[in-house]
Image (cartoon, helix red, strand yellow):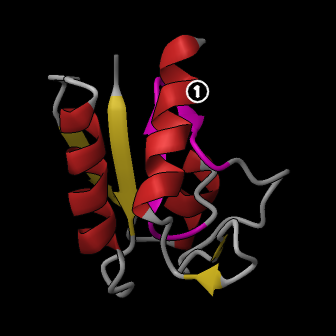
């Protein structure tokens, strides 16, 4: 299993997203380490299909897919279950996405 967190340095949310991701993986007893990938150019963002920071992928699949972009150096926006817009996925959103990814 390959677990990646793609981020843009200018976005302040990726460190908390990484912490939440690691906690959720530990709860599921997933021992794989998280590979951090810094995206530094617009060209790289397009090539990586990077919709913004933070982006979490397992085996190349975005845990929170966006249909065909846009891609670029930006902070990402997530929509929580309560309808609130947030700059990173909640801990529960990450846990649920990991559950789904591990079942497939």
Q: Does residue 26 appear left or right of residue 41 in this picture?
A: left
Q: Quadrant of residue 3?
A: top left
Q: Quadrant of the N terminus?
A: top left
Residue at (70%, 74%) from the top-left corner? 82
Give how far across and how far down residue 90 sits, in percent: 47, 66
**Where is 24 relative to 77, above or below?**
above
Residue at (50%, 65%) from the top-left corner? 89
**Where is 35 relative to 19, above or below?**
above
Residue at (46%, 34%) from the top-left corner? 98
Does 47 lie within the magenta span? no
Residue at (33%, 65%) from the top-left corner? 17
Say which element carries label 1: helix
The residue at the far top in this view is 104
**Where is 102 relative to 47, above or below?**
above
The mark tally for this picture is 1
The residue at the far front in this view is 82
The residue at the far right in this view is 67
- Find disc 1 in the rendering and name its residue: 100
Does 53 lie within the magenta span? yes
Q: Quadrant of the C terminus?
A: top right
Give how far across and how far down residue 66 sits, in percent: 76, 54
Give how far across and how far down residue 71 sits, in percent: 68, 65
Q: Within 10 Å of the Cα at label 1, are there few (<14), some (14-19), or many (20+) other Cα atoms?
A: few
**Where is 35 relative to 38, above or below?**
above
Q: Does residue 42 appear left or right of residue 25 in this picture?
A: right
Magenta range? 52-64
């Amino acid at each position: 299993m390959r677990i990646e967190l793609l981020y843009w340095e200018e976005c302040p949310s990726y460190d908390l997203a990484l912490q939440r991701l690691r906690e959720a993986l530990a709860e599921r007893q997933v021992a794989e380490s998280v590979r951090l990938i810094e995206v530094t150019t617009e060209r790289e963002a397009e090539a990586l299909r990077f919709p913004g920071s933070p982006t979490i992928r397992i085996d190349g699949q975005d845990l929170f897919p966006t249909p065909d972009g846009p891609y670029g150096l930006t902070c990402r926006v997530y929509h929580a279950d309560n309808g609130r817009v947030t700059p990173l996925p909640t801990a529960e959103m990450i846990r649920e996405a990991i559950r789904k990814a591990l079942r497939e």
